[in-house]
Amino acid sequence: MLSKKCLVNYMDTLKEVEELGIKIKRLEKEIQSAEDELARIEENETVKDKVYGGEGGWQGFVIEGIPVPEYYTKSEKLRLKKALLGQRKSTLELIQLDLVRQVKDVEMFVASLDDAYIRRIINFRFVQRMSWTAVAMKIGGDNTADSVRMAFTRFMEKS
């Protein structure tokens, strides 16, 4: 039998997946911006200098390149962000694997219930992630957010 804690944990895991997805998208945008900045530095911010020297007399040479300290600092930040992105994606995969197990457990639990009223409450609240007020409205009748919440609580205490 599934506990209330497991149902709440299931909802928290769903939220965690959602939040981590947002973090990954934000980091991907930052990486793209950093890559664009490095490309801009490579293309537009080359520096030139003229030096003199050489064998057999003084000759002028033009040296051209990118500003090394700025480029390497930004390049290192980009490398670290890419590593963080890989780590976050791996974490997301692990959480999603756990979520698949939790979904199976929750759905089997809901399907095994004899009471259709409680099945509907659990489905609306935990599977569809509705607020208690929205659950009460979906159930209909004279139900309030408190009445459906208490019905669920009493059912879980009996189980």
Image (cartoon, rainbow, N blue to C red):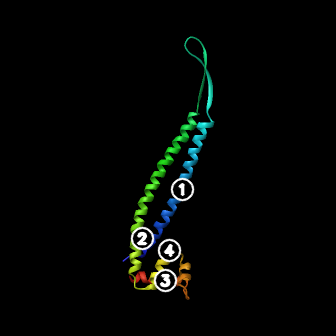
Q: Is residue 91 above or below residue 102?
A: above
Check residue 25 in the rendering and tell me which mark sits there, or answer none: 1
Specify which label sits upstream in the sequence, 2 or 4: 2
Q: Residue at x 59, y 43 (%)?
A: 37
Q: Helix or strand or loop: what does disc 3 sit on?
A: helix
Q: Amino acid at mark 1?
A: Lys
Q: Residue at x 43, y 62 (%)?
A: 95
Split into 4 quadrants, where in the image is the C terminus?
Answer: bottom left
Report the residue marked by disc 4: 128
Q: Earlier in the sequence, mark 3 or mark 1?
A: 1
Q: Earlier in the sequence, mark 2 or mark 1?
A: 1
Instruction: Name the N-terminal-most of marks 3 and 2.
Output: 2
Report the quarter where the N terminus lies.
bottom left
Residue of label 3: 150
Percent x, y of residue 70: 58, 37
Residue 68's image quarter? top right
Q: Amino acid at mark 4?
A: Gln
Q: N-terminal of the two: label 4 or label 3? A: 4
User: Which amino acid does the dot numbered 2 rest on?
Assistant: Val
Q: Which residue is mark 2?
A: 103
Nearest-to-viewer mark from 3 and 1:
1
Q: Residue furthest front?
A: 43
Q: Earlier in the sequence, mark 4 or mark 1?
A: 1
